[in-house]
């Protein structure tokens, strides 16, 4: 079931072929005493209505930071140094603080990793829901409470009339993440940034939450940026996937083709590391080495120190995103025959 | 919920019985009251008569039971020093101390909490830094120094406020208050401020530290991500989660001030319990000391019980878990 939308103002005409989120050449920096650390080094991506874009990569790749930049909650030391972020055709990276605050929750929802700590322990679930709705929507207390009940029902929480009067500690982890999802959706945002929404949950609960996220996006036409390090979650949930490495997108495309035929050596490593029920493998593939530190970026392709195909060109010149079948990948070796097979 | 309240009250009663035992032991170990009360020429017959009259001929347990029975009825005996009933001596002075302590605590909370919140949310700004420095000075200067400085400026130099005493007071049965007369209110300002300055600084520092901690919490980040205005994030979400230690410390502070406001009371010649206690110690006036011990303990126990009940009210998790932690742990 869905809830009748509350109309406040028609959204601005969609930009860039109807993209809900349109990130252009985004650069995020952290000025420090020892110099500027560039954590995100020029990212382009778009997400359309009802589309789920998975963003994967190791920790430190800049995937969470991209999400944080979109909702405008960068640490005070960080800043969007270059590029633009557009949501529903409106540029949001340079908005004043108050304007951005109105957008959060209303146009851009967010879901964080740990449902156990994402809810305020001293307020009832109903209070947290109605408070958020009433900040963004012209609802009376009773109307908001009514919608809160319907929302909890929508995200699959049994006996919602009772549940809205309860406190977070009275919910299990999976149920709390459902509450978090309800909170992220309660003012009907166009875009949801889900940062590791299933990482803190049991595997059996993970599948339920992934299915729920998928369903609400489809039912409501919400665009979602699903940030995770788990290729398995991406494979089940996302429509497209962007693979990040050292602050850049190294491969982006439809999820099916990237899983079936990854083009970038790093993506291959990530996919090789998914355990499979059907293939019998002695060992899972692993990528040797670690992500470079922000203050010690290698020249050329940032992945070259860990790449078995690295050559002179990789060390000197950074590869741009090049078309590769239905996806794009940033690698000089896309035409190598052996690269198209799983290493 | 009701069973938890009853449990708290039960605990409080148990603590009070233990304290009563300690107070009772003062009489047992600090010399023989008969020796103290009678002069050296008293005959053995006179001594025995007094011993029987005081119930000292009975066994230990019976004496303790008698002591408790009397204490419950508000009978702490007669002061050795001025032969007045201890209870009426204390009743005369207790309102003055309580009024002073409560007024200064209210001042401290209503100034300390907002300043603490401000220093936390504007961390690093010049005003916040200045507040932090002032609060450091505030917790370091003893209250009597502040009292003397206040007297020097506002009583001696400017002649705005009285330097000592309690002003005109109004009686309500056995209770007295200075809050209803202009001179009583004026007399209260300086002692209350000199007590409050430490408390303001202390509460401010506590609130700032707690706020900085809570503002890093995930639920605050999530509240911001939902677009809640700062007012709601700071006061409804963050401050509420800081209140437990503030409630704890305020409770301790009130008890502490009632028991040990004597320095400030001495500086301002405030007719409170502090002076009574100092005199009792100097004259080894055991009934007064025992009564003082009992009353101060009763105040601490009452405050702590109230603090525990406030915990239950503030934090829903404790209502369910059935265990109130003494101090809010992170």
Image (cartoon, coloured by chain):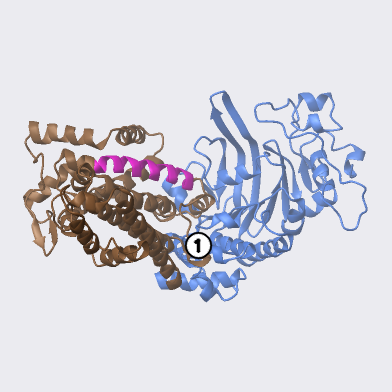
Percent x, y of residue A338: 92, 39
What quarter of the picture does the N terminus of chain A occupy?
A: bottom right
Q: Which chain is brown?
A: B
- Does residue B201 belong to the magenta stretch? yes
Q: Residues within 10 Å of mark 1 (few under 14, many from 20)?
A: few
Percent x, y of residue B6: 41, 70
**Residue that badge 1 annotates:** B323
In the rendered structure, which segment of residues is drawn in magenta? B195-215
**Position of B222 compared to A293: left or right?**
left
Which residue is at a point 23% across and 53% down the rendered structure image? B34
**Position of B72 compared to A112: left or right?**
left
Q: Which chain is blue?
A: A
Element at label 1? loop
Percent x, y of residue B8: 42, 65
- Does residue A268 belong to the magenta stretch? no
**Position of B23 compared to A93: left or right?**
left
Look at the image and tell me whether residue B73 can be seen. yes
Asked whether B230 or A104 is in front, the reply is B230
**Position of A138 compared to A256: left or right?**
left
Q: Magenta span: helix, strand or loop, mainly?
A: helix
Q: Quadrant of residue B63?
A: bottom left
């Amino acid at each position: 079931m869905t809830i009748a939308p509350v109309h406040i103002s028609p959204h601005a005409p969609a930009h860039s072929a109807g993209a809900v989120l349109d990130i252009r050449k985004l650069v995020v920096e952290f000025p420090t005493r020892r110099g500027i650390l560039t954590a995100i080094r020029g990212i382009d991506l778009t997400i359309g209505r009802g589309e789920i874009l998975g963003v994967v990569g190791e920790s430190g790749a800049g995937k969470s930071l991209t999400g944080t930049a979109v909702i405008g909650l960068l640490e005070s030391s960080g800043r969007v140094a270059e590029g633009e972020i557009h949501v529903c055709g409106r540029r949001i990276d340079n908005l004043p603080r108050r304007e951005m605050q109105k957008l959060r929750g209303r146009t851009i929802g967010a879901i964080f990793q740990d449902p156990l700590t994402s809810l305020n322990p001293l307020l009832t679930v109903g209070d947290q829901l109605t408070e958020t709705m009433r900040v963004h929507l012209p609802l009376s207390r009773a109307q908001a409470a009514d919608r809160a009940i319907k929302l909890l029902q929508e995200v699959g929480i049994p006996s919602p009339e009772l549940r809205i009067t309860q406190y977070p500690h009275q919910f299990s982890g999976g149920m709390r993440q459902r509450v978090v999802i309800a909170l992220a959706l309660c003012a009907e945002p166009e875009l949801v940034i889900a940062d590791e929404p299933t990482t803190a949950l049991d595997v059996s609960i993970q599948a339920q939450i992934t299915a729920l996220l998928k369903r609400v996006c489809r039912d409501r036409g919400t665009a979602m940026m699903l940030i995770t390090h788990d290729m398995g979650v991406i494979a089940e949930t996302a429509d497209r996937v962007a693979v990040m490495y050292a602050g850049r997108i190294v491969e982006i495309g439809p999820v099916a083709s990237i899983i079936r035929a990854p083009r970038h050596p790093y993506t291959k490593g990530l996919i090789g590391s998914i355990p499979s029920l059907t293939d019998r493998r002695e060992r899972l593939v692993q990528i040797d080495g670690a992500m470079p530190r922000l203050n010690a970026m290698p020249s050329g392709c940032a992945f070259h120190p860990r790449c078995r195909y690295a050559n002179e060109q990789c060390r000197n010149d950074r590869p741009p995103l090049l078309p590769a079948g239905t996806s794009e990948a940033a690698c000089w070796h896309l035409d190598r025959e052996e690269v198209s097979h799983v290493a | 919920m009701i069973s938890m309240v009853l449990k708290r009250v039960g605990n409080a009663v148990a603590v009070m019985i233990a304290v009563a035992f300690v107070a009772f032991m003062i009489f047992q170990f600090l010399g023989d009251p008969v020796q103290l009360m009678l002069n050296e020429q008293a005959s053995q017959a006179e001594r025995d008569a007094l011993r029987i009259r005081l119930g000292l001929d009975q066994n230990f347990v019976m004496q303790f039971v008698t002591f408790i029975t009397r204490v419950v009825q508000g009978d702490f005996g007669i002061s050795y020093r001025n032969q007045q009933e201890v209870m009426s001596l204390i009743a005369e002075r207790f309102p003055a101390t309580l009024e002073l302590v409560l007024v200064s605590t209210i001042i401290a909370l209503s100034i300390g909490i907002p300043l603490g919140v401000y220093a936390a949310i504007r961390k690093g700004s010049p005003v916040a830094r200045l507040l932090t420095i002032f609060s450091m000075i505030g917790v370091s200067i003893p209250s009597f120094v502040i009292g003397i400085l206040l007297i020097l400026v506002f009583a001696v130099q400017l002649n705005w406020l009285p330097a000592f005493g309690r002003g005109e007071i109004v009686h309500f049965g056995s209770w007295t208050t200075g809050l209803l007369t202009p001179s009583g209110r004026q007399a209260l300002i300086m002692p209350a401020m000199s007590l409050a300055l430490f408390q303001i600084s202390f509460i401010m520092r506590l609130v700032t530290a707690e706020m900085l901690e809570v503002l890093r919490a995930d639920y605050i980040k999530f509240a911001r991500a939902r677009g809640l205005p700062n007012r709601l994030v700071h006061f409804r979400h963050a401050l509420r989660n800081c209140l437990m230690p503030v409630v704890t410390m305020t409770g301790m502070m009130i008890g502490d001030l009632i028991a040990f406001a004597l320095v400030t009371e001495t500086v301002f010649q405030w007719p409170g319990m502090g002076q009574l206690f100092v005199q009792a110690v100097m004259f080894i006036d055991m009934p007064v000391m025992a009564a003082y011990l009992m009353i101060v303990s009763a105040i601490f126990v009452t405050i702590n019980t109230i603090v525990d009940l406030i915990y239950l009210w503030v934090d829903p998790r404790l209502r369910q878990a059935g265990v109130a932690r003494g101090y809010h742990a992170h």
